[in-house]
């Protein structure tokens, strides 16, 4: 495969992967805010059950907070990794190290960013489970 074509294919795949995780992250953020608001509403609407609901509310909000912390670090770490990779690739191209027409591209550098994406789904899922449990308490 020619290096220009390979570069374009790799770049296209990364654009698509980034686009999908970005969209999923935006949806998760909206969902987390909505879930937090509904949990708050339920907690304050059922004053007779507040003592019973309080531990669930605290755990749910800690889970949502953990989601936002992981979300932030995913993008911060991703920024630095992509910046480093861009600088390295720029140096390689500027040094004219690609004299060969064929080369392999490694995806390992980006894996930790995607691992954080998957990791942040855990606390939002946990908060959702707690939210469902709260619904059973009030019903």
Image: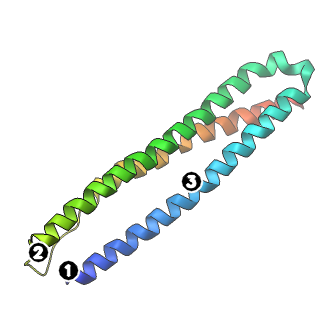
Q: Position of residue 9 (x, y in %)?
A: 33, 77
Residues at badges 1 and 2 in contact (C-beta under 8 Å)? yes
Q: Position of residue 107 (x, y in %)?
A: 29, 60
Can you say which quadrant of the picture contains the C terminus?
top right
Q: Earlier in the sequence, mark 1 or mark 2?
A: 1
Q: Quadrant of residue 52?
A: top right
Can you say which quadrant of the picture contains the N terminus?
bottom left
Q: Earlier in the sequence, mark 3 or mark 1?
A: 1
Q: Report the Cα–Cα distance between label 3 and label 1.
A: 32 Å
Relative placement, left or right, of 73 versus 4 is right
Name the residue that disc number 2 marks. 98
Residue 71, placed above or below residue 23: above
Q: Position of residue 77 (x, y in %)?
A: 38, 46
Q: Earlier in the sequence, mark 3 or mark 2?
A: 3
Q: Report the Cα–Cα distance between label 3 and label 2.
A: 36 Å
Q: Total of numbered circles in the picture?
A: 3
Residue 139, placed above or below residue 19: above
**98 or 135: nearer the eye?**
98
Residue drawn at x 39%, y 51% as measured from the top left: 78
Name the residue that disc number 1 marks. 3
Q: Which SS class for mark 2?
A: loop
Rate crowding at label 1 as few (under 14), some (14 to 19) or many (20 or more) other CA atoms within 10 Å.
Answer: some
Name the residue that disc number 3 marks. 25
On residue 118, the disc is none
Residue drawn at x 61%, y 41% as measured from the top left: 124
């Amino acid at each position: 495969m020619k290096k220009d074509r390979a570069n374009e294919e790799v770049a296209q795949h990364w654009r698509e992967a980034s686009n999908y995780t970005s969209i999923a992250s935006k949806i998760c953020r909206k969902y987390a805010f909505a879930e937090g608001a509904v949990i708050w509403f339920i907690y304050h609407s059922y004053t007779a059950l507040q003592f019973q609901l309080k531990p669930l509310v605290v755990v749910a909000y800690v889970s949502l907070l953990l989601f936002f912390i992981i979300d932030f670090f995913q993008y911060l770490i991703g920024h630095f990794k992509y910046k480093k990779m861009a600088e390295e690739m720029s140096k390689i191209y500027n040094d004219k190290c690609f004299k060969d027409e064929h080369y392999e591209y490694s995806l390992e550098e980006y894996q930790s960013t995607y691992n954080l994406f998957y990791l942040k789904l855990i606390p939002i899922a946990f908060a959702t489970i707690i939210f469902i449990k709260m619904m059973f308490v009030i019903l």
